[in-house]
Protein backbone atom coordinates (compact mmCIF):
# COMPACT_ATOMS: atom_id res chain seq x y z
CA UNK A 1 0.00 0.00 0.00
CA UNK A 2 1.37 3.46 -0.88
CA UNK A 3 1.67 5.68 2.23
CA UNK A 4 1.15 8.79 0.08
CA UNK A 5 -2.44 7.81 -0.63
CA UNK A 6 -3.35 7.57 3.06
CA UNK A 7 -3.27 11.34 3.48
CA UNK A 8 -5.33 11.81 0.36
CA UNK A 9 -7.92 9.29 1.54
CA UNK A 10 -8.14 10.88 4.99
CA UNK A 11 -8.54 14.30 3.40
CA UNK A 12 -11.25 13.03 1.11
CA UNK A 13 -13.05 11.43 4.04
CA UNK A 14 -12.87 14.64 6.06
CA UNK A 15 -14.08 16.61 3.05
CA UNK A 16 -16.96 14.19 2.50
CA UNK A 17 -17.93 14.44 6.19
CA UNK A 18 -17.91 18.23 6.03
CA UNK A 19 -20.01 18.15 2.86
CA UNK A 20 -22.49 15.76 4.48
CA UNK A 21 -22.74 17.98 7.56
CA UNK A 22 -23.35 21.03 5.37
CA UNK A 23 -26.09 19.15 3.51
CA UNK A 24 -27.80 18.28 6.80
CA UNK A 25 -27.70 21.91 7.94
CA UNK A 26 -29.14 23.03 4.60
CA UNK A 27 -31.89 20.41 4.81
CA UNK A 28 -32.88 21.59 8.28
CA UNK A 29 -33.02 25.18 7.06
CA UNK A 30 -35.07 24.19 4.00
CA UNK A 31 -37.51 22.06 5.96
CA UNK A 32 -38.92 25.08 7.77
CA UNK A 33 -41.22 24.29 10.66
CA UNK A 34 -41.97 20.63 11.32
CA UNK A 35 -44.63 19.77 13.88
CA UNK A 36 -44.54 16.33 15.49
CA UNK A 37 -47.97 15.00 16.47
CA UNK A 38 -49.27 11.89 18.16
CA UNK A 39 -50.87 9.50 15.65
CA UNK A 40 -54.40 10.35 16.87
CA UNK A 41 -53.73 14.09 16.50
CA UNK A 42 -52.28 13.50 13.03
CA UNK A 43 -55.41 11.61 11.95
CA UNK A 44 -57.56 14.41 13.39
CA UNK A 45 -55.63 16.95 11.34
CA UNK A 46 -56.23 14.91 8.19
CA UNK A 47 -59.99 15.28 8.67
CA UNK A 48 -59.58 19.04 8.13
CA UNK A 49 -57.98 18.57 4.71
CA UNK A 50 -59.81 17.60 1.53
CA UNK A 51 -57.77 15.07 -0.48
CA UNK A 52 -54.66 15.28 1.73
CA UNK A 53 -51.26 14.45 0.28
CA UNK A 54 -49.46 12.11 2.68
CA UNK A 55 -45.89 10.86 2.41
CA UNK A 56 -45.44 7.52 4.17
CA UNK A 57 -42.44 5.34 4.93
CA UNK A 58 -42.02 2.06 6.74
CA UNK A 59 -38.81 1.22 8.53
CA UNK A 60 -37.20 0.21 11.75
CA UNK A 61 -34.32 -1.95 12.88
CA UNK A 62 -35.73 -4.17 15.62
CA UNK A 63 -39.43 -3.35 15.23
CA UNK A 64 -41.48 -1.88 12.41
CA UNK A 65 -42.32 1.78 12.55
CA UNK A 66 -44.59 3.69 10.24
CA UNK A 67 -43.90 7.35 9.52
CA UNK A 68 -46.26 9.86 7.94
CA UNK A 69 -45.92 13.47 6.84
CA UNK A 70 -48.39 15.98 5.42
CA UNK A 71 -48.77 19.73 5.15
CA UNK A 72 -51.56 21.96 6.36
CA UNK A 73 -51.73 25.74 5.91
CA UNK A 74 -48.04 25.96 5.05
CA UNK A 75 -46.77 23.89 7.96
CA UNK A 76 -45.42 20.33 7.83
CA UNK A 77 -46.79 17.72 10.23
CA UNK A 78 -45.18 14.41 11.09
CA UNK A 79 -46.06 11.35 13.13
CA UNK A 80 -44.75 7.86 13.67
CA UNK A 81 -46.60 4.79 14.84
CA UNK A 82 -45.89 1.17 15.73
CA UNK A 83 -48.85 0.10 13.60
CA UNK A 84 -50.09 1.34 10.21
CA UNK A 85 -52.56 4.23 10.40
CA UNK A 86 -55.95 4.00 8.75
CA UNK A 87 -55.70 6.94 6.37
CA UNK A 88 -58.69 8.75 4.82
CA UNK A 89 -59.99 7.12 1.65
CA UNK A 90 -59.56 10.36 -0.32
CA UNK A 91 -55.88 10.76 0.63
CA UNK A 92 -53.19 10.77 -2.03
CA UNK A 93 -50.40 8.56 -0.72
CA UNK A 94 -46.75 8.82 -1.72
CA UNK A 95 -44.63 5.88 -0.58
CA UNK A 96 -41.09 6.94 0.35
CA UNK A 97 -38.15 4.70 1.12
CA UNK A 98 -37.34 6.76 4.21
CA UNK A 99 -38.44 9.93 5.95
CA UNK A 100 -35.76 12.01 7.62
CA UNK A 101 -36.67 14.54 10.27
CA UNK A 102 -34.30 16.87 12.12
CA UNK A 103 -33.53 15.70 15.64
Image (cartoon, rainbow, N blue to C red):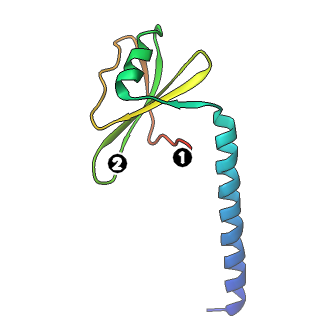
Q: Position of residue 73 (x, y in %)?
A: 59, 15
- Label 2 crowd bin: few (<14), some (14–19), many (20+), radius 10 Å: few
Residue ID at (72%, 67%) = 15
Residue 19 appears in which quarter of the rendering? bottom right
Q: In front: 5, or 17?
A: 17
Residue 4's place in the image compared with 95, above or below, is below
> Which numbered disc flags the more N-terminal residue, 2 or 1?
2
> Number of numbered discs present?
2
Which residue matches tag 1? 103
Give the CA separation, mark 2 to mark 1: 16 Å
Residue depth check, mark 2 versus mark 1: number of the one nearer the observer: 1
Q: Position of residue 38 (x, y in %)?
A: 39, 29
Q: Position of residue 67 (x, y in %)?
A: 40, 35
Residue 33 appears in which quarter of the rendering? top right
CB atoms of marks 2 and 1 within 8 Å: no
Q: Position of residue 13 (x, y in %)?
A: 65, 71
Residue ID at (66%, 56%) = 21
Which residue matches tag 2? 60
Residue 1's place in the image compared with 68, above or below, is below
Say left or right for 57 vs 75. left
Residue ID at (48%, 40%) = 99
- Label 1 crowd bin: few (<14), some (14–19), many (20+), radius 10 Å: few
Q: Secondary structure at mark 1?
A: loop
Q: Secondary structure at mark 2?
A: loop
Residue ID at (39%, 16%) = 44
Residue 8's place in the image compared with 81, above or below, is below
Q: In front: 93, or 85?
A: 85
Residue 8's place in the image compared with 18, above or below, is below
| The N terminus lies in quadrant | bottom right
Numbered tag placed on residue 59 in the rendering? none
Say left or right for 30 vs 77. right
Amino acid sequence: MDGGNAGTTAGATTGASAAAAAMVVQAVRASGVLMRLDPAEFLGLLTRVKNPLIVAAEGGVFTNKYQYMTSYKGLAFYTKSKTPLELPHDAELVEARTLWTPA
